[in-house]
Amino acid sequence: MSSDKLRSWADLTSMTKGEELIVERVRLAERDIAIEGQFELPRLVQLSTEDQIFIMAFVKAHGSIKEMEEVFGLSYPSIKNRLNKISEQFTFIEERPALSKADILKQLERGEISTKEALERIKSL
């Protein structure tokens, strides 16, 4: 397929109407090589076109909600709600692994946390 026949990603998402996609063939544009198999698309690509545009604008604005308010003509709460709605579609890796009961007791023993804080942490496990 020559570059003048290439369709945009928006065309593909429009044709599929949000249904799950599995890519089964990939062709390297600069070489005569095609790879076949089943490839899951990255989660960002699975967002709606509107959400992708919103996220690109957010990144371009360096995360400035104030700038997003100006670009989209929306209020701060509207921007936050939209970001929350989008973020709910992702599974995030917890940066700090959850502590075990033994870890919490060790922190208490070393005097790093109070008895009250240790009890609260253990209850939240």
Image (cartoon, grey):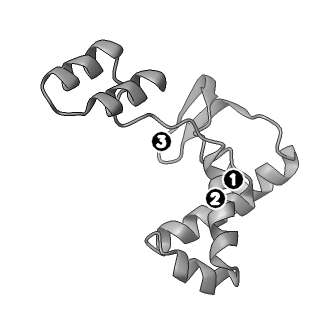
> Mark 3 sits on what residue?
31
Q: Quadrant of residue 95?
A: top left
> Which residue is painted at 54% across and 68% down in the image?
58
Q: Position of residue 103 (x, y in %)?
A: 26, 18
Instruction: Let me know if residue 29 appears in the view.
Output: yes
> Which residue is painted at 62% across and 59% down in the image?
83
Local secondary structure at mark 1? helix
> Mark 1 sits on what residue?
85
Q: Is residue 121 left or right of residue 80?
A: left
Q: Amino acid at mark 2?
A: Ser
Q: Position of residue 65 (x, y in %)?
A: 54, 75
The answer to whether the residues at label 1 and label 2 have Cβ atoms under 8 Å apart is no
Q: Is residue 109 left or right of residue 97?
A: left
In this rendering, the answer to whether 49 lies above or below 64 is above
In this rendering, the answer to whether 106 lies above or below 92 is above
Which of discs 1 and 2 lies nearer the camera? The answer is: 1
Local secondary structure at mark 3? loop
> Mark 2 sits on what residue?
3
Q: Amino acid at mark 1?
A: Lys
Q: Position of residue 74 (x, y in %)?
A: 70, 80
Q: Position of residue 68 (x, y in %)?
A: 58, 78
